Image: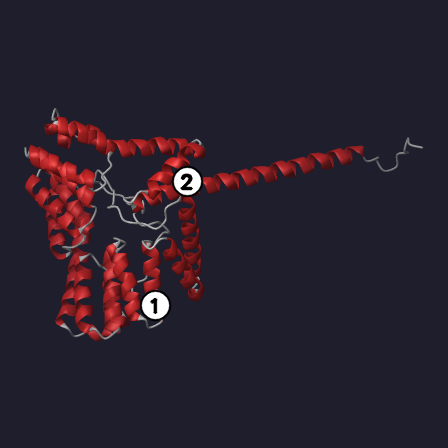
Amino acid sequence: MAILATMLVLPGFSDEKSDTKVIARPGTEVAVKSIAGLARCHRLLEQAEKLFATQEYDQAFGLYEDVLALDPDQALAHARLGYLLVGQGQHKAAAGHFQRESELGHRPEVATYNLACAASLAGDRERALAFLQQAVRRGFADRELLTVDPDLEALHGDAVFAWAVESVEKAVMLRKKLATLKMAGDDKAALEAQAALVEIVSEDGVLVHDLGIKQLQGGELQRAADSFQRQMELGYQPASACYNLACARARSGDREGAIASLERSLALGMSFGGVLEDEDLKNLAGDPRFEMLKENLAAPEMERKKIAVAIAAGDFAAVLPVLEKMLAAPDCSPKLRGWTCFQIVGRAEKQAVAAALKKKQEMEKGLAVEARRVEEKRPVEGEKSTRG
């Protein structure tokens, strides 16, 4: 069983770094429809993670359930409950949580590996092997765990298990080679190594996406388009994939295809202020459809920047109604939920702590001043009192 060692973040807000133009994730139906609910969910998750870290599993279990009651799409809570349920021997229930975690896009390679573990422990050898194959194709790379994990002991000796071990070894070697080539600045060889890696890890949306970006930057427009199409099929950041597909099509002279891809990207929830100056789309300049698409694609990001400025200035009253409305929208994405939580909840709490600290300091200062006054009024020892 693979245990996630992760920073506490909301799904879709992992502060991920990438050389792509965008990192938006697809929207999803959510239960948390208010900032107050979002704040409560986040605090419960923080408490549960602290208990999980100290192996106070019974208490953590209840809190993770409370989190999912507020937000059924909290992927980390699904991951933790799956792990805890396996420990209780409830393999079918655990599998349900791992499956949902995978669907939400939260470390799908780890979630799928854990699905293999749950199936193996339940005695379903066929499903366990199928999940193991998928986990490797999705990028599972912990060879050491794979070879010693007692949860998969029943699969040892099977040809699929041997293939999984061999494939993970090859992928690890290719990743090391890729890193070396990148450091050496050998872009051509690095691109070849990345393409070879994607042949093994064919369902890793991140790698497929990165390959497409490198191909686009290198002028391999058709291969880039194929990679972005594949990324869409895998369901990894489809709005981003459509946008980058539009870039590849625009550069290759396919104006209609590029416009169609941009329209699809917008429909999937794409927001990208950089579209206003994107050189990859310059061939579309002058097309009235493109001008309208540019405005619509840039507008949400521009609005969020204004909100962020207001939040930084402490003007919560002006932005809370706007964010409440955004959170209540049916297409509110995990990315937006995470952004809202860290902008509003985090800053509001820091502001409250700062205000409390200031009040405490002022109180202590006042007490110190009063103490000095009392001390100044107290007669010096040995002096006669003038009273009486």
Identify the secondary structure beneath mark 2.
helix
- Which residue bears the numbered disc 2? 344
On screen, residue 137 above or below 378: below
Categorize mark 1 by other alpha carbons within 10 Å: few (<14), some (14-19), many (20+).
some
* Residue 64: image location, x then y, percent: 39, 59
Element under disc 1? helix
Percent across and percent down for residue 387 are 91, 32
Please tell me which residue is depicted at 15% across the width and 36% down the height of the picture: 262
Quadrant of the rendered image containing residue 75: bottom left
First-in-chain label (1 vs 2):
1
Specify the quadrant that holds the N terminus. Answer: bottom left
Q: Position of residue 305 (x, y in %)?
A: 33, 32
Q: State the mark number for residue 165.
A: none
Color encoding of the figure: secondary structure
Residue at 9% x, 45% y: name it: 226
Left or right, 382 with reference to 135:
right
Q: Which residue is mark 1?
A: 85
Q: In the rendered view of the protein, which quadrant contains the C terminus? A: top right
Count of picture labels: 2
Going 23% across and 41% down the picture, which residue do you hit?
A: 269
Amino acid at pointer 1:
Leu
Where, by quadrant of the figure, is residue 376 drawn?
top right
Q: CA distance from mark 1 to mark 2?
A: 34 Å
Place residue 302 in its image quadrant: top left
Confirm whether residue 4 shows in the render. Answer: no
Outermost residue toward the top in this view: 286
In x, y percent, where is residue 163? 14, 66
Given residues 50 and 294, the one toward you in this image is: 294
